[in-house]
C-alpha cells in the first residue's frame, strides 16, 4: 500500500508498525512517510535500525533482572532462568517478565545444555566435530566435503543444544536470539540470559 505524496499516514498504520518493530511514534511516522506509506519497507527499515541499536547496547553492563521459574503440570519438569537487564525499572516491566517466562517455557520444552555456542567448552566442541568428521569419512566422503558436512552438523548441534540458536516454540519462524534482540530494541537496554 503506497500513500501518494502530500497525504499523511494513519494512526492505525503507525500503531501497527510500532507493535511490530518497537519503534517510537515519531520514528514510525517518519519512516512510513519517507517510504510513501510502503508498510513492508518501513518494517524492514525499522527492524534494521533496531538490530543496529541492539548491537550498540551489547557491551553495556546488565546486573539487574530477575529469576524466573517454571514448573510444568505434574511437577515432573522444572526450569530456573536468570535474565538480566541494566535497570530494576526495566526488570519490573511486563515485557521483560513476559520474555523471562517465554524463555523458561522454551527451556522446559527443549532442554538446551548451553545458552549460546560461546558457552560450549572447547573439548566438547572438538569431540562433536571429531564424531561428525569420522562419520562422514566412514561414508567415503572426500576431505573437503567432510569439512562442509562437519560445519552443517555443528550448526544443527547448536540448534539442539544452545538456547539462543533454537526456534521459538510459540513461533517457529523466530529464533530465540531474535526474540531477545527485539526486546532489547523495545526496552532500550541490554538483556543477557544466564
Image (cartoon, rainbow, N blue to C red):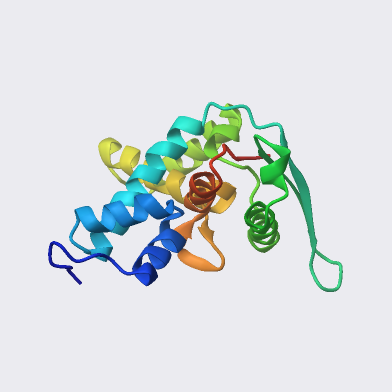
The quarter of the picture where the C terminus appears is top right
Q: Residue 10, located in which quarter of the rendered image?
A: bottom left
Q: In the rendered view, would you say 118 is above or below 137?
A: above
Q: Position of residue 118 (x, y in %)?
A: 54, 33
Residue at 22 percent across and 64 percent down: it is 37
Q: Residue 11, located in which quarter of the rendered image?
A: bottom left
Q: In screen coordinates, is 181 left or right of 44?
A: right
Farthest left residue in view: 5
Residue at 57 percent across and 38 percent down: it is 189
Q: In screen coordinates, is 3 left or right of 71?
A: left
Q: In screen coordinates, is 136 left or right of 164?
A: left
Q: Is residue 39 visible?
A: yes
Q: Position of residue 47 (x, y in %)?
A: 36, 51
Q: Position of residue 71 (x, y in %)?
A: 81, 63
The quarter of the picture where the N terminus appears is bottom left
Q: Which is nearer the eye, 149 or 92? A: 92
Q: In screen coordinates, is 159 left or right of 34?
A: right
Residue at 60 percent across and 34 percent down: it is 119
Q: Is residue 44 visible?
A: no
Residue at 40 percent across and 43 percent down: it is 51
Q: In the rendered view, would you say 80 is above or below 85?
A: below
Circle count: 0
Q: Position of residue 146 (x, y in %)?
A: 33, 41
Q: Residue 109, located in which quarter of the rendered image?
A: bottom right
Q: In the rendered view, would you say 63 is above or below 164?
A: above
Amino acid at each position: 500500500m503506497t500513500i501518494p505524496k502530500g497525504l499523511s499516514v494513519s494512526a492505525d498504520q503507525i500503531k501497527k508498525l510500532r507493535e511490530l518493530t518497537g519503534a517510537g511514534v515519531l520514528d514510525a511516522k517518519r519512516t512510513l512517510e519517507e517510504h510513501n506509506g510502503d508498510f513492508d519497507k518501513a518494517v524492514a527499515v525499522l527492524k534494521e535500525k533496531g538490530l543496529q541499536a541492539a548491537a550498540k547496547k551489547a557491551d553495556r553492563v546488565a546486573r539487574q533482572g530477575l529469576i524466573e521459574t517454571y514448573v510444568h503440570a505434574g511437577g515432573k519438569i522444572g526450569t530456573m532462568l536468570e535474565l538480566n537487564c541494566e535497570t530494576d525499572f526495566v526488570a519490573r516491566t511486563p515485557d521483560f517478565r513476559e520474555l523471562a517466562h517465554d524463555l523458561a517455557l522454551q527451556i522446559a520444552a527443549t532442554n538446551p545444555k548451553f545458552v549460546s555456542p560461546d558457552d560450549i567448552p572447547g573439548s566438547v566442541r572438538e569431540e562433536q566435530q571429531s564424531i561428525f568428521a569420522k562419520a562422514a569419512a566412514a561414508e567415503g566422503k572426500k576431505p573437503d566435503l567432510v569439512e562442509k558436512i562437519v560445519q552443517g552438523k555443528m550448526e544443527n548441534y547448536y540448534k539442539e543444544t544452545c538456547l539462543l540458536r533454537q526456534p521459538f516454540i510459540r513461533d517457529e519462524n523466530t529464533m530465540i536470539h531474535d526474540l531477545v534482540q527485539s526486546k532489547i530494541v523495545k526496552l532500550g537496554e541490554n538483556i543477557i540470559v544466564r
